[in-house]
Amino acid sequence: MDPADGGVAIYPTNELPVRVTLPFTVTFYGQTYDALTISFKGYAAFSQPGAGPTVGQSTCLPTAALPNDAIYVLWQDWDASLGGQVFVQQPDPDRFVVTWFQVRRFGGDLPHSFQLVLLRSGGLTLQYRAVQSPVQGTIGLENWDGTVATQIACGGTGDLPSDGAAFSLSARLPW
C-alpha cells in the first residue's frame, strides 16, 4: 500500500513511540487489543513498551528484555534525524497498515521502506519495498513476557527479506 494514498503521518522519535487506536480489535497470542504503540525503530507493540535507549538495540527472539508483546517488522536502531517517516492508514475496513518509509540506520546508509499489515481476521503481513542487503535487525513476533516468539531473522541470519518480499504470519498460541 502506498502511504501517499490515504496515509496519515505520525511522529515517533528515536526515544518516544506513538500510541494509536486501532479501527478493530486484534487478537495477539491469546490477548485482545484495541491500540498499538508504534516505534520509529521498526516495531509495533500492543502493550506500552519502555522508551529510551534500553530498547535501541535489536536482539534475537524470544527474550524477556523490552520491548515485548510486539511485531518486529524490521527492528533496529533507525535514526529519525536522517529523515524517513512513519505512516498509518486503513485502506479498507479489514486492514490497518503501518509504513516505515525511507528510514535510515545510524551511519546513514540507503533508505529502507517496509510495512506491517494487520488484518481484522487476526493475520498479519510484513512487507518490504526497499531493503539494503544484507538485512540486519530482528524480524518476528513475540508475546507479552518474551517467552513465546516466532523469529524470521536476527542479526543478518535467517529468512532475510529482499525488495518486494512479504511474510504472512499469525500470532496464535501453539496450544
Image: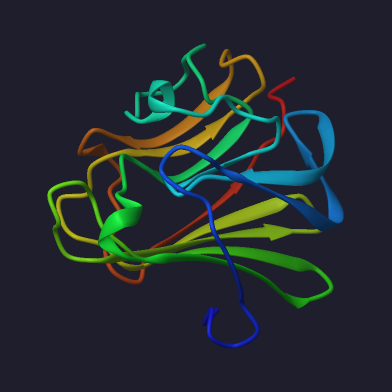
User: In x, y percent, where is residue 135?
Assistant: 22, 49
The structure residue drawn at horizontal position 55% and vertical position 79%, both measured from the top left corner, is 1
* 65 over 41 or under it: above or below: above
**How many numbered marks, from 0 up?**
0
State left or right for residue 102 relative to residue 109: right
The structure residue drawn at horizontal position 20% and vertical position 46%, both measured from the top left corner, is 106
Q: In which quarter of the image is the C terminus?
A: top right
On the image, which quarter does residue 32 sit in? Answer: top right
The colour scheme used to paint the residues is: rainbow
On the image, which quarter does residue 94 sit in? Answer: bottom right
User: In x, y percent, where is residue 34?
Assistant: 84, 46
User: In x, y percent, where is residue 45?
Assistant: 62, 37
User: In x, y percent, where is residue 146?
Assistant: 56, 16
* 80 over 53 or under it: above or below: below
* 133 over 136 or under it: above or below: below
The structure residue drawn at horizontal position 45% and vertical position 49%, both measured from the top left corner, is 40
Depth check, front residue: 123 or 24: 24
Depth check, front residue: 158 or 126: 126
Q: Residue furthest bottom?
A: 5
Depth check, front residue: 4 or 59: 4
On the image, which quarter does residue 50 sit in? Answer: top right
